[in-house]
Amino acid sequence: MIPFSPPRIDQKIIDEVVDTLKSGWITTGPKTLKFENNLSQYCGNEATVCVSAATPGIQLVLSWLGIGEGDEVIIPSYTYCATGNVVIHSGAKLIMVDVNESDFNISVSKIKEVITEKTKVIMPVDIAGLPCDYGEIYDLVNDPEIKKLYSPNNKLQEMMGRIAVISDSAHSIGAEYKGKKAGSLADISIFSFHAVKNLSTAEGGAIALNLPKPFNNESIRKQLKTMSLHGQSKDAFSKMQLGAWRYDVIESGFKCNMTDIQASMGLVELDRYKGNLARRRQIMEAYHKAFEKYDWAKLPVFETKDKTSSFHLYLFRINGISETERDQIIQEISEREVAVNVHYMPVPMLTAFKSNFDIADYPQTYANFACEISLPVYFTLTDEQINIVTSTVIESVEKVLVK
């Protein structure tokens, strides 16, 4: 069986985690701080806060910005449900727009159609690790006519002076747009370090701060760090220093801090991430070479003049098939012991969202989804396994198409 996306757990990871366990400090401490600093250095952003997962990271940011009832947040209809869930939990109104045919990312022209005076945040999602059109998004939020519509509800929103761009960068650490890395492309970007991600801490995430002046990103980092610990003025490591037990709770915060055990994995993964990206690129290029000769194959975009993907997912589409035929192809592939997936079930098709959204309103989202199959991409996938995947896909597609 060729798995879809196993985590890379080797001796380097084991040794670093064991070192943390033996240190006697396993929750948020020095290794988490080191990982945060290393992430900022790698991504080129101003400051970073590590959290327990990407989802609470976005929740923290929306809460910090004061997003709530009466506000509107725009997201793509093609994303994982977490992008929509955080908006609903904030109390704001969720606004979804369709995506591009070419790359699955949010359509900037569709964003423009739904902006109102209540719009406070645009949340683009770098699907599969390919950056969204950030230049066009910033041109939009800085357009004088759009800025005239903007109606802030608090001091932070007044300081922003426009719609905030908060990137769901769960897939895109290491990706680049016009020479800048993900994490420094939006006002705030949130990474995921889930087990299936390029860089894994088992569970985990990070908030990459890159807010414009007059914001002080380091000050905001400290505030978000406090919010992630129930609003407590000191983390456990600080409280354990001699005579430093006394603390305060400054606000009613959340509990979503990263532990040093998670950060241990992250430090190893980030240190060798360049090699990880290089191997993932090789795998995608091998897939391209195998499929490009077939008329039925629609190859995903992972590099353009301005963009380089993180090579997280290979979103392979098959021209001219129905959703039912796609599922039949997946069944054929699975029976031959190759694990594939679909990214994602569009949010409007999920039961929790159907009462307010209709997939018929997002035709490109459905068209992309109905013929999409995600193929395995991970560092330890061998050349022999790549050949097995490609031959299995080709044989399975042609078997179903012949029917």
Image (cartoon, grey):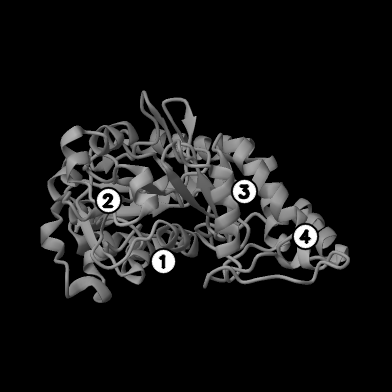
* Element under disc 2: helix
| Numbered disc in front, either 4 or 1 | 4
Q: Which residue is drawn at 67% across and 60% down?
A: 262
The image position of residue 236, as x and y in percent, is 74, 68
Viewed as shown, does residue 21 lie left or right of 140?
right
Q: Quadrant of the N terminus?
A: bottom right
* Element under disc 3: loop
On residue 17, which mark appears?
4
Nearest the eye: 305 or 93:
93
Which residue position is annotated with label 2? 398
Q: How crowded is mark 2: few (under 14 residues within 10 Å), some or many (20 or more)?
A: few
Which residue position is annotated with label 3? 380
Alpha carbons under labels 4 and 3: distance apart? 21 Å
Q: How crowded is mark 3: few (under 14 residues within 10 Å), some or many (20 or more)?
A: some
Residue flagged by tag 2: what amino acid is it? Glu
Residue flagged by tag 3: what amino acid is it? Thr
Viewed as shown, does residue 297 lie left or right of 376?
left
Sequence-first disc among 4 and 2: 4
Sequence-first disc among 4 and 1: 4
Which residue position is annotated with label 1? 335
Do the residues under discs 1 and 2 have CB atoms within 8 angstroms? no
Q: Which residue is drawn at 55% across and 57% down?
A: 224
The image position of residue 73, as x and y in percent, is 27, 57
